[in-house]
Amino acid sequence: MVTAGVLISGTGTNLQAIIDRIAAGTLDCRIAVVVSNRADAAGLDRARRAGLATRVIDHRAFSGREEFDAAVVAALRAAGVDLVVLAGFDRLVTRVLLDAFPGRIMNVHPALLPAFKGLHAQRQALDYGVRVTGATVHFVDEHPDHGPIILQGAVVVAPDDTAETLAQRILEVEHTIYPAAIQLFAEGRLAVEGRRVRIAGERRAAGRLLPDWRRGSS
Ligand code: GRF
């Protein structure tokens, strides 16, 4: 069982996926606190509906990123958190948070890192013309969207995809791989070796993803 603190800024569908897995008994995790830097984040309502403790820590009330992170760290420590889950959290983290939870901060990004870091990754993927994109769960380090990769899932880009339709399919992958990565952490199966994350007992078959480009029958 891992005690998690979830940091959000917005809709909170990844938070919801984690809540649902816990409720279903397939994720050995307790969410001790949900922290949002935005009071109007819809994810806060999801947390409240699930009976979770919530905190709003408005980044604008602080003189800098370190000061904000110090307040977040205090809230996480007060809740007894041992894993920090960034779920649509829109602030860059500083050493203050990283040093407080070394190797114990995860993030999800809507692309196959290292491609399409930063904002609007789905739009970036479409504009670049990739045929396969996806989602990545990774440990957080001092560079944005950079730390060791825990799990990835691929999404085939359709010719008529928009940023919105692509984002929706990527989210479905996020909602699968994020709870799965947390479960691996809870089971103590993740070991970071340089850039690589070793998953104890993993049976990962070599494989290939071949999207079908043939003419349709219609
Ligand atoms: C997700 O696409 C995630 O990859 C990115 O922000 C979005 C958060 O969505 N970091 P939600 O708030 O979990 O619905």
Image: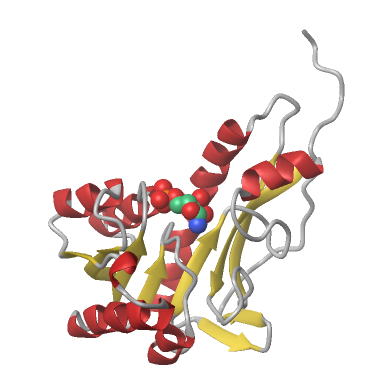
Compared across the picture, whether 48 is left or right of 73 comes to left
Res 182 → quadrant: bottom left
Residue 71 can be seen in this image = yes
Going by the image, does 128 lie left or right of 171? right
User: Which residue in the rendered view is the most extreme toward the left?
Assistant: 51
Q: Position of residue 192 (x, y in %)?
A: 59, 86
Residue placed at 77% from the left, 56% from the top? 207
x 72%, y 65%: residue: 114
The quarter of the image holding the C terminus is top right
Q: Residue at 29% of width from left, 70% of height from top?
A: 29
Q: Locate residue 122, reporting x and y percent.
A: 64, 45
The residue at the point 58 percent across, 65 percent down is 151
| Vertical order, 150 against 130 (above or below) | below
Q: Residue furthest front?
A: 63
Residue 6's place in the image compared with 153, above or below, is below
The quadrant the N terminus occupies is: bottom left
Answer above or below: position of 28 versus 208: below
Residue 41, position as x, y percentages in the image: 30, 50
Report which quarter residue 86 is drawn in.
bottom left
User: Residue 61 falls in which quadrant of the image?
Assistant: bottom left
The x, y position of residue 56, in whole percent, is 22, 63
Q: Is residue 120 left or right of residue 90?
A: right
